[in-house]
Amino acid sequence: MYKSSTLWLSLCLSSLVMTVSLVAGTSARTFATPNEEISQLNACAGKNPCASANPCAGKQENVGGPLARKLQGKPVVVDIYASWCSACKNIAPTMSELKEEYAGKAHFVVLDVSDKSKAAESARQARELGLSRFFEANKSQTGMVAIIDPDTGNLLIQHRNNANKSAYTSVLNSALSQK
């Protein structure tokens, strides 16, 4: 009786170990997809999209043409803002400093998408200013700040959640020196 119990216990333990090993191996293969496979599924996977100097610049080069007459003559800083957005709160001090430093030298446009009514008002404002295409392409990108040449509608720089003031001042200074 003792031998058969020991044999039976050994078989049960071996089966249990085999089952656990198989489950663990299958789970590891299922959930730990190699980086190459992830990269093929998503081109941005494994890369830090914010690592480049201007990670958002390649998305849209022009907002659709020259901006409204009232924006001409000065670079235009456009901020896609929402009161609930943590990125917006992060860049708020930088935007405040820029507004103070470039008062009268640049136009600042805030397109607020905090709720449906504010987003609708911002869409109307964007249409009026010649920024409709830009707004439609970026309204879900809260914390997005772009500097636009009003004469051509070309994006000079576009960042998301970048509180580095010098990233904006260098572009603004360059644009102002060309005027």
Image: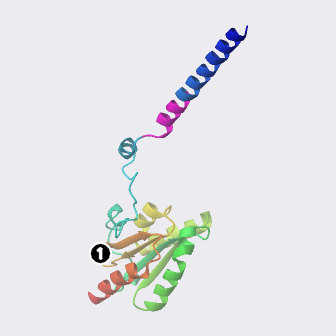
Q: Indicate the position of residue 105 as horizontal and vertical percent values.
A: 39, 90
Vertical relation: 56 (above or below) 2: below
In the image, the segment drawn in magenta is: 23-33
Amino acid, disc 1: Thr
Q: Indicate the position of residue 153 as horizontal and vertical percent values.
A: 33, 73
| Residue where numbered disc 1 is placed | 152
In-front residue for pair 78/49: 49
| Magenta stretch secondary structure, dominant | helix
Query: Quick one: quadrant of the N terminus?
Result: top right
In-front residue for pair 93/47: 47
Q: Indicate the position of residue 21 as horizontal and vertical percent values.
A: 54, 28
As drawn, is 149 to the left or to the right of 99? left
Q: Indicate the position of residue 165 as horizontal and vertical percent values.
A: 43, 81
Residue at the image point whose x is 43% and y is 75% from the top = 129
- Assess whether residue 122 is covered by the magenta stretch: no
In-front residue for pair 69/96: 96
Residue 112 seen from this side: no
Q: Residue furthest left?
A: 178
Residue 29 seen from this side: yes
